[in-house]
Amino acid sequence: MVTADSFVAEFESKNENSFRNLLAAYLQGVEKEGFSATDLLRIEAKFVVEATEVAALWLVDSDSLDSKMALGAQCGDAARQYQIIGERLTALGVDLTAFDPRSSGYTKLFAFFRSLQSPEERAAASALTLRGMNVRRMRATAVLCQEKGDPETARLFQEILIADEERHLHAGRKSLLASALAEESQARARRASFRTIEVLAENLDGPTLRKYLARSLKKPTAAPVS
């Protein structure tokens, strides 16, 4: 069995190849679908809502006080992110009363994360894999927004969202170092990461993202019959 330090170092190194493939597919989908900076913000809002709920669910059944506080911080950051994204969408002319990222339903990634029970699975899947990929995706998204003539949205991704992701990634790395101490826990972490990569490939697919956007618009309330 390898030490936790060696395991985590190898774990993150192997993830890099997967991240490159996922990012290339994501960028190809964004280009093919012709997403605007506003579209990319609305998609991010959905991811932020799900991240909030996952952290809240895990907080309740976490035994470690450190983990509870870390998850609480994630909830707080995600709520702040959602508010900032909403303010930017409003500035771009989006009517938030007609937008609800929950209307498209939950993603398969959310369902998978709900099933994870051990600290090493959660750290490997959420922090080191999802957030590791998020950092790379957000950097690319910031560049896309800049190229689309929206430097303010690019700044939001670069200076606010990425900074939060990197902080939680670091906390997750510490959690995995503390929990992946045996062969069994390391195997669980690997499996959780591998499945996260699989589901992310579908989550970040262009047509899937387009479906999220289409379904995030609230249906108008029917007028009462007189």
Image: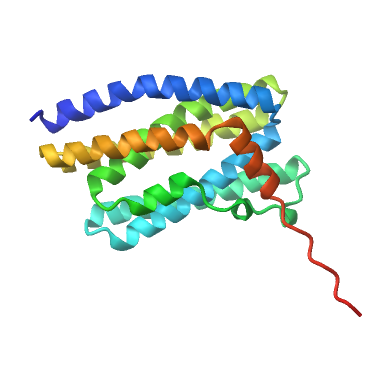
Answer left or right for 97 relative to 153: right
**Quarter containing the C terminus:** bottom right
> Which residue is drawn at the image coordinates 44% and 39% (left, top)?
164
Q: Splitting the image into 4 quarters, where does residue 84 fall?
A: top right
- Give x and y (percent) for residue 141: 58, 27
Q: Is residue 69 left or right of residue 29?
A: left
Q: Is residue 21 above or below residue 121?
A: above
Which residue sits at x=34%, y=56%? 58
The spot of residue 80 in percent (x, y) is: 53, 50
Question: Residue 203: horizontal and vertical position, in percent?
Answer: 51, 37
- The residue sitting at the bottom extreme is 226
The one of 49 and 154 positioned closer to us in this rendering:
49
Give the camera-side residue of 154 and 127: 127
Q: Quadrant of the N terminus?
A: top left
Image coords of residue 213 (percent x, y):
67, 43
Residue 86 shows in the view: yes
Q: Residue furthest right?
A: 226
Q: Residue furthest left?
A: 1
**Foreground: 98 or 198?**
198
In the depicted view, which residue is nearer to us: 101 or 139?
101
Quadrant in the picture for residue 158? top right
Q: Quadrant of residue 45?
A: top right
Residue at x-position 63% and y-position 26%:
30
Residue 181 appears in the figure: no
